[in-house]
Structure formats: C-alpha cells, structure tokens
Image (tube, helix red, strand yellow):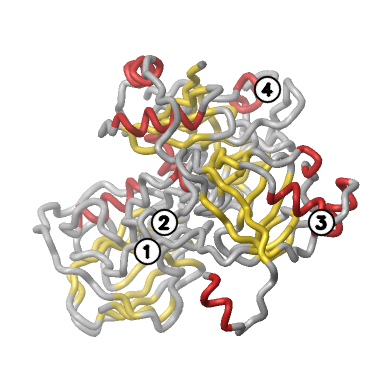
Amino acid sequence: MRLRRAGDAALLIETGTPHRLHAAIRGLARPEIVEVVPGARTVLVTARPGTDLGRLGTLVGDLPLPETNEAGGEPLRVPVVYDGEDLDEVASLAGLCREEVVQRHAGGDYVVAYLGFSPGFGYLAGLDETLHVPRRDSPRTAVPAGSVAIAGPYGAIYPSRSPGGWRLLGRTTLTLWDPDRDPPSLLQPGTRVRFVAQAAVGEGDPDLARAR
Amino acid sequence: MIEVLRPGPLATIQDLGRAGYAHLGVPHSGAADRVSLCLANRLAGNPEGAAGLELTFGGAVLRFHAPAWIAVTGAPLPMRPATMNAPCHVPAGAVLEFGVPAAGVRTYIAVRGGIDVPPVLGSRSADLLSGLGPSPLTAGDRLAVGRPTGMISVDVAPGLEPEEEPVLRISPGPRDDWFEALDPLVRGPYEVTAESNRVGVRLTGPALTRRREGELASEGMVTGALQVPPNGLPIIFLADHPTTGGYPVAAVLATADISRAAQLRPGQRVRFRLGARS
C-alpha cells in the first residue's frame, strides 16, 4: 500500500484490494471524509479542506480490511437479449462464432471494479480473455440505456443514454440508474454481476410485462 | 418568481454540488467559483449552500415578478438597476439586465431565499457532464424563490479582483513520476483555450514529457487536478469533471485557487507556482 497526495485535501492510495479498502474507509464514517472513490488499483479519499492529511494517512493505513465488502453477497442477475450491433465484429475479432461470444460473456462471474464515465456506469472485471477487444475506432454519438457492452478487459451496462465507444453485445431491461431511488445505482463498487441470456421478446408482447 | 427573458451564452442553477456520490460516477458539480457563490449567498442573507444562478459571460435579462433581495458577485459586469457585491432590493416587475464582464467568466446571482427547484441527489446544481439537475436556463423559464431563512447582515464585501495573469499554486502529484520533470509546467506561461468549460480549463503552452509508456489504470480524480493527456498539455479540472480518469495527474491546484481558475478566460495567460501554501 502506498499513499500519494492528490493536492492539499485528498490522498490517493495504491492497493491490491481497492474494494475492501473502499469498504473499510467508508465504514469509518469520519466527518472529515467527503468522498471515497475506488479505481482499478487505487482508492481516492477526499477530505474537507484543512484536514491533516498526515493523520488521515495513518488512520487509513492501519485499517483492518473486511474479508469481503458488504456488496459481496448474491450476484445481481442481469437478463440480456444478445442482439447487439457489434456482436459479429466481436466474434470476428475474437475468432469465435456469435454463439460462443454469448456463451463466454454470459458464462462470466463479474465484479464491479469501479464506477465512472457516467453515473452508475460500472467497470465489470472478470471478462473472458478471448473477449478482450479494443474500443471502436470512432465512438457512437448515442448508445441507448441498458446496452450491454465490452471494451478492453471490462464489461459494462450503459446506465443512461450517452455517447460511447464500447462494443455492443446486447441489451437489458433493468434500470441501472435512477436518481429517485436509494441507492440510485444498482451497481456499487464490489457488486457481483451475472448475465443471463434471454430470448428476444417482441415489442408490445404481453410476455414482456411478466418477464420483468 | 423570476422570469428568464434571456439567459445569455450559458446560465445554470448552482449550489455547492453533490457530495458523497463520486464512487457511483456522479460528478461533484456545483458552482465553478464556489468562493463567489458563497459570498453572494452571505450578502443575500442565505446559507452559503443556497442555489443561485451562474452566468457565463453575462448577457442575461431577468424579470422579477415579486420584490426580492439579491446579490451579484464574481466576474464584474455592467448591470442595471443594481450594483455588485452588495445586497440590492429589486422591486416587483423590475427587469434586470446584465452586460458582458470585462474580466473573468462567471457571475453569480443569489436571491434571498434561494432558487427553489427540486434537488437531485441532494443538490440543485446543473451538472453539464452527466445531465443531472436542472437544465441550463432558456428564455421563458420561471424560477421559484424559496422562503428566506436568515437576515441580511452584510452591507458590502470586497468582490473578485480581476487578474491579468494569475499565478496559481500547485502541489506535485499524485502522478508527477509519470513525467520527466514539472519544469515546463512551472516555467509556463500557458494560454487558456476556447474549449474550456465547466468540466475543465484547457491550456496551450509548454508540453510535459512522459517518462514512461503505457496507460494508467483509471483512478479517482479531484477538482483542481492538472490532468495531462498524451499531447502533454494540462487540463485543469473544474466542478463537472469526471469522477475517474485514465490520464496521469501531474499536479493539483491549491484548494484556495480553484475558484480563481474558474474565472480564467479564453486567450488569458496563466502561470503555476509550486508550493500549495500561501
């Protein structure tokens, strides 16, 4: 674990276990701590201006880490219709057929490594290595909410409509992000995720309501 | 009630932002120049975190349908019929016209009682990166004003002093070791480009040279960070910056200087100086 200063009011902590450290620091519920933000290999702790960062560093440096974090229970099951626009391209990049891409994507055990890019956008670690494909050369100006996508070593579900360069494999009807819900994001750092392949259901099909 | 007759180039509702949701990818947002919003609120007898208006390059015209107490701070601009950096009474039916600031970018208008729009995740701020909170103001918008909670107790306050070529204090890191040296950054000067917005101030000037190849694993970003993309030119992150990023941060502005950075205009020159303490 290595501590770096990020200005006069934040510490960036390098760690091999960002989820557990994130959970431990959040668990302190210290009034001087404003934000605790996990990254791929770091946890950023932002404090109120004027906080003694040396003392804060000692405090978080000596923390006992939980075995797992509170989000580590039953995985969130995400139903996916695999009819994404980039499925064929991913299959050809990976040297697989479409069905194998779906099998390998839906067969994975994922964990939300961290969130970013947009509210509720989780970077899902655990993607099958054969599916590690680069982003599109030119991003789409609008990717619909619920799009299930991959890029590099990560999977993701677009929580809201946004521009995006990830490769689209399919779509889900789950609402990933709703600011009126508490918590607003279905995904938290450390949340486990499984994808469940579903047959496409026609628009207006009465089964759709029941399936949800 | 306040009617927006003309918003100017960009006018948004801002308070002090959404704290506590960065781990979910929610930008902090809030007034880009927090110092000026807090001052406007104090002058108007509000708590510092009440929602006010942030004008970008002025230009707004507002009609007050009910009498109000207001205070205007930040980038100094010609306005009538009121003055800056002091509480002003606005009679019912008055139309306030804001000119274009001669220096600075952002002017703040606090109204006694605060602008009353529904909060999203605890804040009334318009976050232009993720689209949370109220949309930027458009002509015809009608803004409700909340109930006053405090008394006006300040007559007049020193306002923003426009700076020709500000020198902003930085502290190195957290990723200064990704660069050969921070000398170019400290030597400067840099010029602010027209692509600057609430996400960040973009600069041209001496480029920083990378010491190492490869990509940084994405990590949390602070407001005031000088993030350096592959072209070597730093971007100063302001209120609507993304919560995580994959380009290394060479240095971070002193917290006390972030509001000054938020007033940098395109074409203006800026320098950096090591040493976060004043």
| Secondary element at tag 2 | loop
Circles 2 and 1, Cβ within 8 Å, touching? The answer is: yes
Residue type indicated by callout 3: Glu
Comparing labels 1 and 3, the label whose residue is closer to the camera: 3
Of residues B37 and A180, which is closer to you in this image?
A: A180
Of the numbered discs in the image, which one, if any, rests on residue A99? Answer: 3
Chain containing mark 3: A
Q: Is residue A37 positioned above or below B74 on the image?
A: above
Residues indicated by labels 2 and 3 sit on the same polypeptide chain: yes
Q: Is residue A175 above or below residue B170?
A: below
Pointer 4 residue: B179
Q: B92 or B159: which is nearer to us?
A: B92
Which residue corresponds to mark 2? A184
| Residue at (62% x, 31% y) in the render | B248
- Circles 1 and 3 on the same subunit: yes
Q: CA distance from mark 4 to mark 3?
A: 45 Å
Residues at marks 1 and 3, CA–CA distance in whole angstroms: 37 Å
Pointer 4 and pointer 2 on the same chain: no
